[in-house]
């Protein structure tokens, strides 16, 4: 069975990472969470006081990019790779609402995108990879054999994200999460460099009313259709 590149794009909190992990495990492919990479850069900016509620020192962050080393390390107990920033496991720290509030602003910066896209393309040199993000099918892997674009209503996505944060013990309100989702949608779709758009050859999936099992079954069927083609 031939190896392919699977690109999964879409809005925030549509379950892209969950689906990508399921596919990678089923197919024994490499999974790359590009959102974690951008979150790690945003976390780095926060830790170094480059960004805050009312300021963003973009130039200093750009100058500091050579000092940012990102690495995925597989955690056998969890069954997936975790994000390491300069040798430190930051998987938990980058999933907070605080990082979510800044990640789209950091991802707007062309120099940040260039650095991460180069790394992402290198990871996919040998195919057999599932990668999710905002510009995987349009910029990172425009020739991917299968492109999925995931969407759902802002309210549905906010509820999912709110439930997830509540389970982790984070003290957040649904209203704040919905605001964050809508703000990220606007920034992601309106940035000048690699805005979030549907690739011409992508298959759109609205999972507002799909559970994880139904979604996985539908996409796995698409994968099987592609890998059978010579």
Image (cartoon, helix red, strand yellow):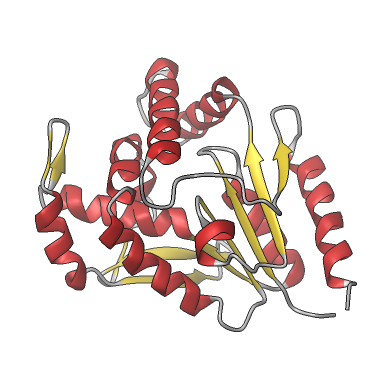
In the rendered view, does 105 fall on the left or right side of 62?
right
Name the residue located 67 percent from the left edge and 76 percent from the top edge: 128
Quarter holding the C terminus? bottom right
In the rendered view, does 47 fall on the left or right side of 196?
left
Query: Where, by quadrant of the figure, is residue 41 drawn?
Result: bottom left
Name the residue located 69 percent from the left edge and 28 percent from the top edge: 208
Name the residue located 19 percent from the left edge and 52 percent from the top edge: 45
Using the image, determine if residue 83 lies above or below residue 8. Answer: below
| Residue 161 x/y as whole percent | 50, 32
Tally of numbered discs: 0
Using the image, determine if residue 159 lies above or below residue 105. Answer: above
Q: Is residue 72 visible?
A: no
Quarter holding the N terminus? bottom right
| Residue 168 x/y as whole percent | 44, 37
In the rendered view, does 137 fall on the left or right side of 81?
right
Using the image, determine if residue 16 lies above or below residue 164. Answer: below
In the rendered view, does 24 fall on the left or right side of 183?
right
Give the residue furthest to the bottom.
Answer: 126
Name the residue located 57 percent from the left edge and 67 percent from the top edge: 141
Give the residue furthest to the top.
Answer: 175
| Residue 95 x/y as whole percent | 39, 45
Q: Is residue 117 visible?
A: yes
| Residue 80 x/y as whole percent | 56, 64
Query: Where, by quadrant of the figure, is residue 118 drawn?
Result: bottom left
Query: Where, by quadrant of the figure, is residue 56 drawn?
Result: top left
């Amino acid at each position: 069975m031939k190896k392919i590149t699977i690109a999964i794009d879409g809005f925030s909190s549509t379950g892209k990472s969950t689906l990508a992990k399921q596919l990678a495990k089923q197919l024994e492919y490499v999974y790359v969470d590009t959102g974690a990479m951008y979150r790690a850069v945003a976390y780095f900016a926060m830790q170094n006081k480059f960004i805050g509620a009312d300021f963003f020192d973009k130039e200093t962050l750009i100058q500091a990019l050579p000092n940012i080393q990102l690495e995925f390390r597989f955690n056998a107990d969890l069954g997936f790779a975790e994000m390491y920033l300069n040798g430190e496991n930051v998987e938990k720290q980058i999933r907070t609402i605080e990082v979510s509030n800044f990640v789209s602003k950091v991802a707007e910066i062309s120099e940040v995108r260039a650095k991460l896209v180069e790394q992402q393309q290198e990871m996919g040199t040998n195919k057999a990879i599932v990668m999710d993000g905002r510009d995987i099918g349009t910029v990172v892997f425009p020739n991917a054999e299968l492109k999925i674009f995931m969407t759902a209503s802002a309210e549905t996505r906010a509820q999912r994200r709110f439930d997830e944060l509540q389970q982790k013990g984070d003290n957040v309100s649904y209203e704040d999460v919905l605001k964050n989702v809508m703000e990220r949608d606007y920034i992601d779709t309106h940035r000048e460099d690699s805005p979030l758009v549907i690739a011409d050859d992508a298959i759109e999936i609205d999972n507002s009313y799909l559970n994880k099992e139904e979604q996985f079954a539908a996409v796995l069927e698409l994968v099987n259709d592609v890998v059978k083609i010579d």
